[in-house]
Amino acid sequence: MPLVVGAVLALVLAACADNAGSTAPATGQTSASDASLAAAKANLANYLTQPTSIVQSTPLKSAPPKKKVAFVQCADPNCAILAGFVKDATAALGWNLTTLSATATDPGSAVQQAIDAGVDYIATTGYPVDLFKQQMNQAKSKGIPLFMCYSTDVPAGPGNNLYADCTDGSAAGITGGAIADFVATDSNGKADVLLVTIPSYPILTAQADGMRAELAKNCPTCKVHVLETTVNDLAGGAVPQSISSYLQANPGVNYVYFTYNGLEKGVPAVLKTAGMLGKVKLVGTQGAQPQFTEVVNGTSAAWSALPQELAMWTMVDQMARVAVDQWSLPDERKAAVTPFYLVTTPDQAKPLVGEKYGWPGPAGFKDTFKKLWGL
């Protein structure tokens, strides 16, 4: 999701492969069956209503003791927003938080700073553990657990010293699947989708894989093309023109799916200038204020509402559970898939236009966590 690193992209990986744009048409049967489209509609129905509760429901046996936490902030500007959410959650517990900035290629140095500072817990978003193996081993030897979100590493608690990965690869696959079912039903089995992604981000690849798998299952007549972009393309503003050129060369495409909302920046304007905006429907993951505004005015068809703020509080909740010796892997795995929904109508989108960072989570979720924590 989430996005996750998503987003707003709460993830920065070291190696950003210089991949050229490519296509990968999906293969399948010659016609979509009524049964497969019915399955798509049934699954989609699970994600069309705003969730009203969080996943976590087990209260702590006692209020957590005071802890020192280090948050390793990634280089993406969105990570500063995430750091603010972590600060709010740890402050609610009365804990001390130190935020350390990391570069895109060397998160290990910031993790080392956290270890040297003698913190109790280390948290981060998006970085795969492979980028700081040495520091991870050192943290484990010193009894400093790691907590994260928006990665594809799988927690094993004491086994690998990773105690949380909220909105992880499994969650990303579910989000991608929900959007696949939207385009399948919205097109009545006739979707021809251009999937725009950055393949060097594993969390985005997990989302894209989930989308394609669900589409192959529930809409065998639907087609998927893949436009691979890079971080340099994104930073240089090259993505909108690449999409425009692709659509001109492939006039049958009727949906453009963005695995990250940053990839959509500038696209509506370029497509409008090219006279193609009304010929394709824009859908994507991690909608924020600009995307929900587009749903209101009709230039976007659907965006997932993934709660970044809730994700950070979910990560801190896992810290609180470790602090009172009440952590369990089944509980963490269940909570890792944070609630989300698809915003597909102007009425759904209008209340979110005022939310700068997108949907924060179910109403009152912070008070729910505080109650669970015994505060």
Image (spheres, rainbow, N blue to C red):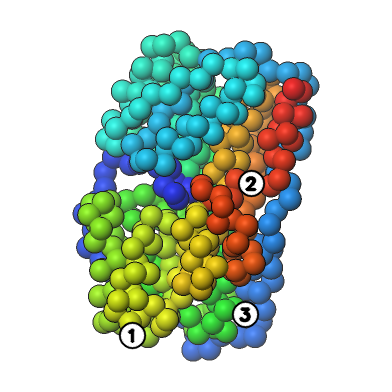
Q: Secondary structure at mark 2?
A: loop
Question: Residue sitting at 68 percent across and 57 percent down?
Answer: 50
Question: Residue sitting at 33 percent across and 29 percent down?
Answer: 102
On the question of residue 268 being in view, the answer is: yes
Q: Is residue 12 left or right of residue 143?
A: left
Question: Residue sitting at 64 percent across and 46 percent down?
Answer: 361
Which residue is more in the foreground, 200 or 350? 350
Residue 291 vs 1, above or below: the answer is below
- Give the mark nearest the N terminus, 2 or 1: 1
On the question of residue 212 being in view, the answer is: no
In three-dimensional space, the C-alpha distance between marks 2 and 3, rounded to whole angstroms, equals 30 Å
Q: Position of residue 371 (x, y in %)?
A: 77, 29
Q: Amino acid at mark 1?
A: Pro
* Residue holding disc 2: 361
Q: Secondary structure at mark 3?
A: helix
Q: Amino acid at mark 2?
A: Gly
Q: Position of residue 103 (x, y in %)?
A: 29, 32
Q: Residues within 10 Å of mark 2 (few under 14, many from 20)?
A: many
Q: Quadrant of residue 259?
A: bottom left
Q: Secondary structure at mark 1?
A: loop
Q: Amino acid at mark 3?
A: Leu
* Residue holding disc 1: 251
Q: Is residue 331 left or right of residue 74?
A: right
